[in-house]
Amino acid sequence: MSRPTIKIHNADTGEITEIAMNDTQYEQYLKDVAEFDAKKTAEETKAAQKAALLERLGITQDEANLLLS
Amino acid sequence: MGSSIYPVPLSGIQETLVDAKGDLIVGSAADATARLAVGTNDHVLTADSSATNGIKWAAASGGGAFTSIASGSLSSTSVSITGIVGTYTNLMLFVRDWYPSSQDHYLAIRFNNNSSGTNYGWTLVRSQATSTGANQFAANEFHFNDGANGQNNSDGNNFAKFTIFDYTNTSTHKFAEFGGSFLAGTTPTQTQRVINGGLVWKATPAAITEINIIMIGGSSFSAGTYELYGVK
């Protein structure tokens, strides 16, 4: 699988290049993706827990907002 | 009532002095005229005492307080604007009409490609039910759509503006104001959200010479443009 590319615009020379990530950049990219996935999973888990709690309480999100306002 | 007799001038500026459309007749010395040939497109007339006729055509010098440093289209997983010279006081970055190739991925910004440590902190106000957001230096980039991820929708009308102050300073943290709007939510209830806030980059103080515009999440920019200006 080919590595993702990055675009580099040198503002001093005006040169624009689009190249495959080097090892350091690719490592950072994988780290960013892993952090994004973890954050998304956490958000989805939290949303599911919230929905389950609302269902147990037998109220809607709007009703919960009203209670908390 | 007598008639008037007007003398015929014995000298004057001859129309043959000009040769082409746009030529100007200018004073070259006391009681002397000369032809100044039309200049290059978009050049402006500039006084210059060292020029033959004291005036010349020249490129406009910056057009005022804003000078374009770099502009182009967004593509790949990130765009790095490198080689930012330190001849201005502040920087202004505009990012327009971007959207990710995958749902929920979002725009992020780094300075000098700094991703080690958690040097980015911000606070923001956003026009949605959860109206504020903050990150107390727990991120290794600035998340523009923090807490409300981006839509892979070409009609997003996304816009982001950053004003980066005192970017050449090598002794203090860097501060930037940001604002804009973006499309968020889940189809079919996507909504345009307005955002405004400030961010601090607290890495070891260094002049900003590089700005990284990143699509976080693993996808690429499907569209969009960037414009970076120097502000004096």
Image (cartoon, rainbow, N blue to C red):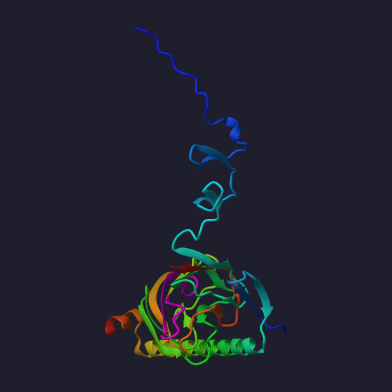
Left or right placement of residue A52 versus residue A3 in this view = left
Magenta-drawn segment: B165-190
**Quadrant hosting residue B172:** bottom left
Q: How many numbered marks, from 0 up?
A: 0
Q: Is residue B47 above or below residue B158?
A: above
Determine if residue B43 is in view.
no
Q: Depth check: B109 or B44 in front?
A: B44
Q: Quadrant of the N terminus of chain B?
A: top left
Q: Where is residue A16 in the image (x, y as percent from the top left)?
A: 64, 71
Seen as rendered, the residue at the extreme right is A1
- Which residue lies at the image location 34% right of the left edge and 89% below the top edge? A57
Residue B27 x/y as whole percent: 50, 41
User: Height in image: A5 above or below B154?
Assistant: below
| Viewer-side residue, B3 vs B66 | B3
User: Toward the viewer: A35 or B164?
Assistant: B164
Q: Nearer the viewer, residue B93 or B82?
A: B82
Q: Which residue lies furthest to the top in this view?
A: B1
Q: In which quarter of the image is residue A11?
A: bottom right
Left/right of residue B18 with respect to residue B127 in the rendered view: right
Q: In this view, does B6 lie above or below A51?
A: above
- Rendering coords of residue B192 (x, y %): 43, 69
Judged left or right of residue B131, residue B116 is right
Whether the magenta-drawn stretch holds residue B177 is answered as yes
Determine whether B95 is above or below B169 in the image: above
Residue under the point 59% across and 82% down: B218
